[in-house]
Amino acid sequence: MDNIPVWHLVIISLITCCVIMGLVWLWAHKIKNAGVVDIFWSYNFPVIAIILLLLAPGFGTRKTMICAMVIIAGFRLGTHLAIRIVSHIKEEEGRYQQLRKEWAPNAERRFFFFFQFQGISNVLLAIPFFVSAVNPAPGLSPFEYAGFALWFISVTGETIADRQLAAFKKDPVNKGKVCDTGLWHYSRHPNYFFEWLMWVSYFVFALGSPYGYLAVISPAIILYLLLKVTGIPATEAQSLRSKGEAFKKYQASTSVFVPWFKKG
């Protein structure tokens, strides 16, 4: 296994992620809730990390370090999403209800390809993991220490943001209100900000390996998706549909992304 080519690792990871997403699509089709894709999109990164931990030929300490980072972060986010989604498993989230309406009458078929694309995106975004895990050079570089420190900050920040939102929603007094406490007082999406920062940390970590600069693709794609595609636009559109004027006032007073800047 010491000489396994990186492209073999990519193919193994791609097949595994796509098979998982195919099975998840079958489940989603049965329960009529496409939102479960978010859970397994997060869990697929630890799956890739385990594959690399077992098969990649890189320096043991570096490989263990990057894989542990990915497993911890992916499992935390996936479990957080699972708790939230499973709690209302019979009610599909508004974002996916909207897609179901837009894609009718071929929604299920289009969801299948959507799920497969999510599996492919897992592998594309995993570039920093592949780059780091196949590097055989002994010892760790300053980039890898810096990447780990930034990762710790980002995971901690995202965990705090998620817990603050969950606590707000759990209180029945807040039903129908907009969460504007804690980090959410400054940013409408602190969880997304720290998620992006985590991908920046993986890029910084990868700079300690040959061709590490290629890993910039990952935070760049995540930033684009969050700001322009499936992240903030879809989430805010749903919030406007469900909370109306209250969310418009919240939009006017907060930063869209960065959690330490508040308007006014």
Image (tube, rainbow, N blue to C red):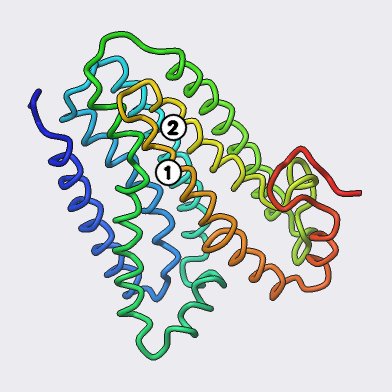
Quadrant of residue 52 within the rendered picture: top left
Q: Within 10 Å of the Cα at label 1, are there few (<14), some (14-19), or many (20+) other Cα atoms? A: many
Image quarter hosting the N terminus: top left
Q: Would you say 22 lies left or right of 89 here?
A: left
- Residues under numbered marks 1 and 2 in contact, where contact means CB atoms less than 8 Å apart: yes
Residue at 34% of width from left, 77% of height from top?
A: 110
Helix, strand or loop at mark 2: helix
Between the C-alphas of marks 1 and 2, the distance is: 8 Å
- Residue 112 screen position, x and y as percent: 30, 72
Q: Residue at x 40, y 25 (%)?
A: 207
> Which of the two residues, 254 or 5, is positioned nearer the viewer here?
5
How packed mark 2 is, by other alpha carbons closer than 10 Å (few <14, some 14-19, many 20 or more), is: many
Q: Nearer the viewer, residue 13 or 210?
A: 210
Q: Position of residue 2 (x, y in %)?
A: 9, 23
Up-down relation of residue 14 to residue 7 (above or below): below
Q: Residue at x 52, y 63 (%)?
A: 230
Q: Residue at x 12, y 34 (%)?
A: 5
Q: Is residue 45 left or right of residue 73?
A: left
Closer to the N terminus: mark 1 or mark 2? 2
Which amino acid is tagged 2?
Answer: Tyr
Which residue carries the number 2 mark? 202
Query: Which mark, by number, is residue 218?
Result: 1
